[in-house]
Image: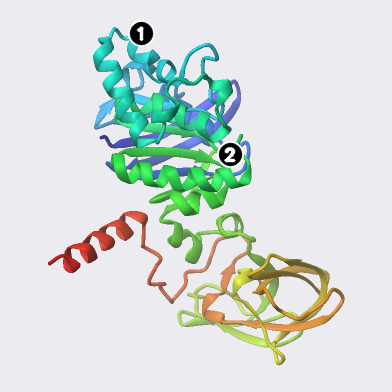
Amino acid sequence: MATLALNNIVKRFGDTEVIKGVNLNVEDREFVVFVGPSGCGKSTLMRMIAGLESATSGDILIDGERMNDVGPADRGLAMVFQSYALYPHMSVEDNMGFSMRLAGVPKAQRRARVLEAAKILQLEPLLDRKPRALSGGQRQRVAIGRAIVRNPSIFLFDEPLSNLDAALRVQMRIELAKLHEELDATMIYVTHDQIEAMTMADKIVVLHDGVVEQVGSPMALYHHPRNRFVAGFIGSPKMNFFAVTVVSAGADGVEVTLPGGAACHVPVNGEGVAPGATLELGVRPEHLLIEEAGTLGGGIQVLERLGGQTSLYVEMEGQLLTIMADGDVAYRVHDSVRFGFDASRAHLFDQTGRALESLKAHPLAALTRQDNRAEAGTQSEEAAP
């Protein structure tokens, strides 16, 4: 497989700068996900890595070799697009082997590599079918198989699940995670769906307006977002925010006044924060706890019952907050509810949106899927006779 380095990559279209000095390292065999809202530059960055767009400035290195002037076909990459782009008149086998046919690979070798990829993707019974006889998920697996047979140094996926329905997206997420483990390959994946990013990535790159806002493991971004944008983008439902007033601040924490007048000590580094300043406090919906003596309260505007959990949308002083509660919670629309939260799970953001540094490191913040696989391997070895 391969490593990738992006050194101060800039991309301009005329006078419009869409990528603004991106620096990033992708390690060998990592599964890295570029995530961000539409227009943030993630697909443009992917296309520059693939060689489909040229960088205005900066260097793209694969295994330490500069690729800026190397054509797409010679970079040793394979790309899977949102559109399956299968040839309708060809069978699955012919679609998967077409690039090798163009490259002059002998027929026996082509078939062997197609069969190997088909086995990995469970496409063996479908090799004689035409694309019209396949489901959406099967067509996407064929497109992935077409990439596998090329034996690339890096796999690139540009929103490959966007055309699938919700159930198929879940299934394909699982299959892609298993495929990464089986191939032990370097993969870069672009999506606007933060759930895809959280469930599949070893490392997430959050992009916004052409800038990398934060890079880290899924749990690092969840527990220690660098700024308000990352805090609001990572996590579903998104984080709740409301204004608080600083009572006192220091290196050991910040005392704030909550809506309603209650005081709260948040364990963040408050050096440089002035008493009387207005900050934003962020609490995730799953960390708001319904309590009879809760320090916060409001009226329920909407209830969404999802079986195992219920989302309560509560109006508090003109703001709508989301609370994730047990599925059997007995509240109804228009009921009043009291709630609170564990201050160690709260976040504070200054007027620029920067997160104040948490004084409580979460034990899972550095955990990646690679760590999970390594731990599973160690447990298997310990269990072996």
Which residue extends farthest bottom? 293
Report whether 203 appears left or right of 192.
left
Query: Is residue 294 positioned above or below 189 on the image?
Result: below
| Residue denoted by label 1 | 102
Residue 301: image x %, image y %? Answer: 83, 69
Amino acid at the residue labelled 2? Cys
Name the residue that disc number 2 marks.
Answer: 40
Q: Nearer the viewer, residue 22 or 367?
A: 367
Circle 2 crowding by C-alpha within 10 Å: few under 14, some 14–19, many from 20: many
Which residue is located at x 70 percent, y 71 percent? 243
Q: Residue at x 48, y 46 (%)?
A: 173
| SS type, badge 2 | loop
Q: Which mark is residue 321?
A: none
Q: Position of residue 192 (x, y in %)?
A: 58, 43
Q: How many marks?
A: 2
Residue at the spot 34% in from the left edge and 42% down from the top edge: 25
Give the position of the C terminus as an image quadrant: bottom left
Q: Which image quarter: residue 106? A: top left
